Image (cartoon, helix red, strand yellow):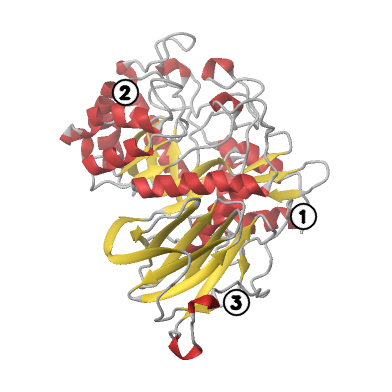
């Protein structure tokens, strides 16, 4: 099967998985409960359903053992997904109508496809809002009453609102919305000093609430409002002590007064280490903290998972979301790596990153662009707003505009194993054990079932044993693969 796969194999194609009979398992000893297995691997499996397996009471004699202890529970999961931007729907619209719907089903349908459950939708302009020039919802200088506020662009054929409504035909997902910049006229100086003038804090609060209300009128509830995308160091240069004031005294009260169900994120730092350093100034203020429902951060330092674990330990009552990460030359990917990446094997990097963020305590994991074209675009250009030309990036799904070939990348498959099977409400439980190149993480579902993800980063098959409540399952993980076991 080509690695540039267009669809996952139908679930009806049951393929035997290698079971380690050297353990001396007997049919009489097997537990009556069937365990379902799905595999994606470098060898060609793509979310492929394998033959059901069963636990045994026999003790393993070969292979690494991982113990699942569901009496020790960690974070509750909120979801997995990516981001919805104009570049994605522009690219999607180049396909024939039936293929467009197939791609949407593959991303959002929990039975047919990945069933994404957490998505990001930027508030107006960002680097892949590509359907027109840079914009905000009110570019009329001094319009503090928002008389000229409009979201009409978002609900055109290439708009993010239209994209959201089309996606929601196939599955439910939480939506979080951050903002790169407010309208330029709210800044001291858009070219040099891109901080928000405090005199415009009341107007900015009105801007946020108006956005939420206009989307609500059109059938879209924004579940989480995030004040700023990568503030202070990348986009709006507002500092976190100022964000604390804006959230505490203006935006938080305005959202509560509106009666809307939207909850708040304080903002989202570009790196884990920056989140660890900057967030306490907001979260340690009780009057600001009461408006924060989720702590969001990005992964562009490619490390420092321990910093998120420490931050989570400091604020254990708050869920954490890793809500943006991707390959982009602008984000430090060496130009020698050709983007976008077609090779399935690249998914192993994303699998390991997801594992590390979840082990640090995050409850949701979102990639950046869900869909881009074969050039890694189309990207928006507004240098003053931090959107350069070129800005080639890697998406979850690549669509070739000329040939109409659709490539579900390794990113898609490794992320889909989580989004499809680890549904909102599942709780991560303790897993112990170690084997070089192999990782195991487990979850208990709200119904009392279990989902276990097994990652094999080795170039050879790996034998592992899962032990749960005194029962043992032995199986072989294909080289460079992710395996999902559910029971």
Residue 400 visible to the viewer: yes
Looking at the picture, tell me which residue is in the foreground, 441 or 289: 441
Q: CA distance from mark 1 to mark 2?
A: 54 Å
Q: Secondary structure at mark 2?
A: helix
Q: Earlier in the sequence, mark 3 or mark 2?
A: 3
Of the 4 image quadrants, the one containing the C terminus is bottom left
Where does label 1 land, which residue? 2
Circle number at residue 201: 2
Looking at the picture, tell me which residue is in the foreground, 433 or 305: 433
Examine the rendered structure and indicate whether residue 350 appears above or below residue 64: above
The picture quadrant where one finds residue 240 is: top left
The residue at the far bottom in this view is: 28
Q: Residue at x 50, y 22 (%)?
A: 139
Dot 1, how many residues are within 10 Å of its Cα: few (below 14), some (14-19), or many (20+)? few
Residue 221 visible to the viewer: no
The picture quadrant where one finds residue 272 is: top left
Q: Earlier in the sequence, mark 1 or mark 2?
A: 1
Q: CA distance from mark 3 to mark 2?
A: 59 Å
Circle number at residue 51: 3
């Amino acid at each position: 099967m080509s690695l540039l796969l267009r669809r996952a194999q139908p679930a009806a194609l049951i393929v035997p998985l290698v079971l380690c009979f050297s353990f001396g398992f007997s049919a009489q000893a097997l537990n009556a409960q069937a365990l379902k297995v799905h595999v994606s691997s470098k060898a060609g499996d793509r979310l492929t359903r394998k033959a059901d397996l069963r636990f045994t009471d026999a003790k393993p004699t070969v292979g690494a053992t991982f113990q699942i202890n569901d009496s020790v529970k960690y974070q509750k999961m909120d979801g997995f997904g990516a981001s919805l931007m104009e570049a994605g729907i522009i690219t999607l619209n180049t396909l024939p109508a039936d293929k467009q719907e197939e791609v949407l089903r593959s991303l959002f349908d929990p039975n047919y496809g990945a069933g994404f459950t957490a998505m990001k939708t930027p508030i107006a302009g960002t680097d892949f809002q590509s359907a027109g020039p840079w914009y905000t919802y009110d570019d009329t200088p001094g319009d503090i009453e928002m008389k000229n506020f409009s979201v009409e662009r978002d609900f055109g054929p290439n708009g993010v609102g239209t994209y959201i409504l089309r996606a929601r035909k196939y599955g439910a997902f939480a939506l979080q919305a951050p903002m790169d910049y407010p309208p330029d006229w709210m800044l001291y100086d858009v070219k040099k000093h891109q901080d928000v003038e405090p005199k415009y804090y009341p107007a900015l609060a009105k801007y946020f609430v108006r956005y939420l209300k206009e989307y609500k009128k059109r059938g879209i509830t924004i579940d989480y409002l995030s004040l700023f995308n990568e503030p202070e160091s990348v986009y709006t240069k507002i500092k976190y002590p100022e964000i604390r004031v804006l959230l505490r005294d203006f935006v938080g009260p305005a959202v509560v007064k509106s009666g809307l169900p939207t909850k708040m994120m304080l903002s989202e730092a570009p790196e884990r280490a920056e989140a660890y350093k900057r967030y306490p100034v907001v979260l340690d203020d009780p009057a600001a903290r009461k408006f924060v429902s989720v702590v969001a951060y990005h992964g562009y330092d490619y490390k420092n998972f321990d910093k998120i674990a420490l931050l989570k330990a400091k604020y254990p009552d708050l869920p954490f979301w890793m809500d943006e990460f991707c390959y982009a030359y602008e984000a430090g990917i060496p130009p020698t790596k050709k983007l976008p990446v077609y090779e399935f094997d690249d998914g192993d990097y994303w699998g390991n990153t997801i594992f590390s963020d979840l082990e640090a305590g995050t409850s949701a994991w979102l990639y950046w662009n869900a869909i881009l074209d074969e050039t890694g675009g189309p990207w928006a250009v507004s240098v003053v707003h931090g959107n350069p030309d070129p800005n080639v990036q890697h998406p979850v799904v690549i669509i070739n505009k000329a040939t109409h070939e659709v490539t579900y990348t390794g990113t898609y498959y490794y992320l889909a194993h989580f989004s499809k099977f680890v549904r909102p409400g599942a709780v991560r439980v303790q897993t112990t054990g170690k084997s070089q190149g192999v990782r195991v993480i487990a979850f208990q579902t709200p119904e009392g079932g279990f989902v276990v993800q097994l990652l094999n980063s080795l170039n050879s098959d790996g034998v592992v044993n899962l032990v749960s409540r005194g029962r043992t399952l032995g199986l072989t993980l294909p080289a460079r693969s992710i395996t999902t076991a559910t029971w």
